[in-house]
Amino acid sequence: MADDLKKDEIQSLGRRSLLAGAALAGAAGVTLAVSSTQSRAQMLDSGVPDTSVLAKVRKGGSLSVGYAQTPLWFFKDAKTGDLRGIYKELVDMLARDLEMTVEWKEVTFANATVGLRKGDFDLFGSSAVFTVPRALACNYIGPLWAKGSYVIVHKDDAERFKQASDCNDASVTFSVNAGSSEEQRLPLLFPKAKFMAITGQQVMAAEPVRTKRATAYVLPDSDALALVKRNSGWAHIVDIDHPFDRRPNTWLIRHGDIPWKNFLDMWSSYVVASGEVQRLYDRYLAELG
């Protein structure tokens, strides 16, 4: 097809057309389009069904994105009320590449997979850690990143817990966010401890530790650093030099939409390999000081 393109048309191929063409790799080869309209039509002609989220590109529809708040990755700025975060900016970047607007829908981790499967939104854009139960219900893309975990305790208990394994004790009660990966994972890592589930946004599960109704709270590494920075009066990270239980995390979509999954896998590989995710991570981490 490139042989037939005029020189000025070849030069006008933008990132948008390259991404749209890459979405078809493995199905009908990479198809480069001269314009957005031609790109959309060629995608559908090449096998993207109308039921796929990718078909919205042709129709000019908005991308519906669900999110749950997590420090650094997806959160509302306390001063402005604006949505911010590493993954929020990546969703914005994805939407620009697809020339789509974004329709935001706030959910909790407890109802995220249910809303996704019901079709309330097309992508869960918050930081979803890999777990088997989630993978059975929804489809992971990428991954975009990987995180270790930290145990957070009250400063009054800092001397009691020198390393994470010290929390594997019958006298310890973990506060966990209902629906989070920690709710499923921690009983396997700390079988002697007790657990209490807190519904709502992630940060609410830290409150029982602050008030000493619970002993410990576990968060992914960057999330924990952000929480402790904002709650320096009481929060303490156990063994900060050694995060544990490192696992991939990324976005979620519905099972069954193979073109959408293939496209997002390609797109996530691009932003990881280009260093874009790392640059965003470094910038937001630097804001913590």
Image (tube, rainbow, N blue to C red):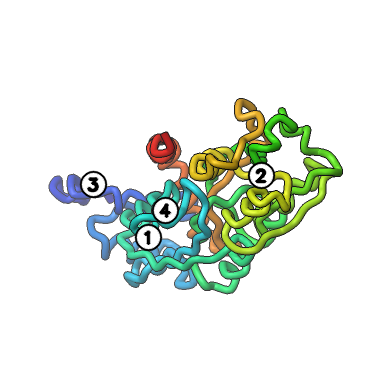
Circle 1 residue: 81
Q: Earlier in the sequence, mark 4 or mark 3?
A: 3
Amino acid of disc 2: Val
**Position of 269 relative to 43 (above/below):** above
Amino acid of disc 3: Asp
Q: Mark 2 vs mark 4: give the one in front.
A: 2
Circle 3 residue: 3
Question: Does the CB distance between marks 2 and 1 fall below 8 Å?
Answer: no
Helix, strand or loop status at disc 2: strand
Circle 2 residue: 218
Helix, strand or loop status at disc 4: helix
Q: Residue 23, position in %: x, y?
A: 42, 53
The Cα atoms of the two marked residues, 4 and 1, are separated by 14 Å
Helix, strand or loop status at disc 1: loop
Q: Earlier in the sequence, mark 3 or mark 1?
A: 3
The residue lying at 84 percent from left, 39 percent from top is: 169
Q: Earlier in the sequence, mark 2 or mark 1?
A: 1
Q: Mark 3 vs mark 2: give the one in front.
A: 2
Near-viewer residue (136 or 208): 208
Circle 4 residue: 88
The Cα atoms of the two marked residues, 3 and 1, are separated by 51 Å
The Cα atoms of the two marked residues, 2 and 1, are separated by 26 Å
Q: Mark 4 vs mark 1: give the one in front.
A: 1
Amino acid of disc 1: Gly
Q: Residue 50, position in %: x, y?
A: 45, 72
Near-viewer residue (9 or 253): 253
The Cα atoms of the two marked residues, 2 and 4, are separated by 23 Å
The Cα atoms of the two marked residues, 4 and 3, are separated by 39 Å
